Image (cartoon, rainbow, N blue to C red):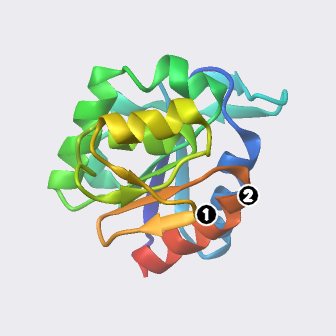
Amino acid sequence: MTKKALFIIPPERFNEDELFHPKDVLENEGVEVTIASTKTGEITGDYQGKVTAEVIFSDVSFTDYDAIAVIGGSGTNDHLWGNQELLSYLKQAHEQNVLVTGICAGSVTVVKTGLLTDRTATCYPLDVQKNELKAHNVEYVEQHVVAHDDIITADGPDGAKEFGKRLVEALS
């Protein structure tokens, strides 16, 4: 059976490397990737890259996916960090043993669920992000990817390909 991943991006200003590199790695390994956001249609990234959000994340069941990845970008801070519906969705997915992951500002979104309290994670090495980890009792680790059995976080564009590889490993 084909493994499936749901990549959730902000409705504007996603990071192209953080979306496209892991997506390519997963698809090259036969994983079916669906792009979701808080709206459907064409979305423009931080560097004017374009992608189509096929679904609104809350309109699809997390149980249809083996992994959920929250993608970073400058829009993630504005649109996903405080999205209570998304935080609840991620917590429920985790309870159903769906792999919950995030990269860059997307890692912070995952941290805000409380699922990483008293654990380690990584994010982009900006104080605003590291401070969010600290505020949620999560220890910041300066490395490209921090993989727990149930949650994976990555630091950003530099770790995007490794993030994709770790997702593939976790789904194997």
Crowd tier of the residue under label 2, counting other residues whose Cα lies within 10 Å: few below 14, some 14–19, many 20 or above: some
Label 2 amino acid? Asp
Q: Quadrant of the N terminus?
A: bottom left
Q: Which residue is mark 2?
A: 158
**Measured from the top left, where is residue 134 in percent x and y?**
36, 40
Crowd tier of the residue under label 1, counting other residues whose Cα lies within 10 Å: few below 14, some 14–19, many 20 or above: many
Q: Is residue 65 left or right of residue 74?
A: left
Q: Earlier in the sequence, mark 2 or mark 1?
A: 1
Q: Disc 2 to disc 1, how far (Cα)?
A: 7 Å
Q: Which residue is mark 1?
A: 144
For image coordinates 53% across by 48% down, the residue present is: 123
Between residue 10 and residue 157, name the one nearer to us. Answer: 157
Q: Is residue 90 left or right of residue 139?
A: left
Q: Relative to 40, does residue 8 appear above or below in the rendering?
A: below
Between residue 83 and residue 6, name the one nearer to us. Answer: 83
For image coordinates 46% across by 45% down, the residue present is: 107
**Measured from the top left, where is residue 171 in percent x and y?**
42, 74
Q: Quadrant of the C terminus?
A: bottom left
For image coordinates 73% across by 57% down, the residue present is: 158
Between residue 168 and residue 46, name the one nearer to us. Answer: 46
Label 1 amino acid? His
**Measured from the top left, where is residue 116 in percent x and y?**
28, 51
What SS does tag 1 mark? loop
Q: Residue furthest right?
A: 48
User: Visible in this render: residue 35?
Assistant: yes
Find residue 69 and name its label: none
For image coordinates 61% across by 23% down, the residue present is: 75
Q: Is residue 126 left or right of residue 90?
A: right
In this figure, what is the number of numbered marks? 2
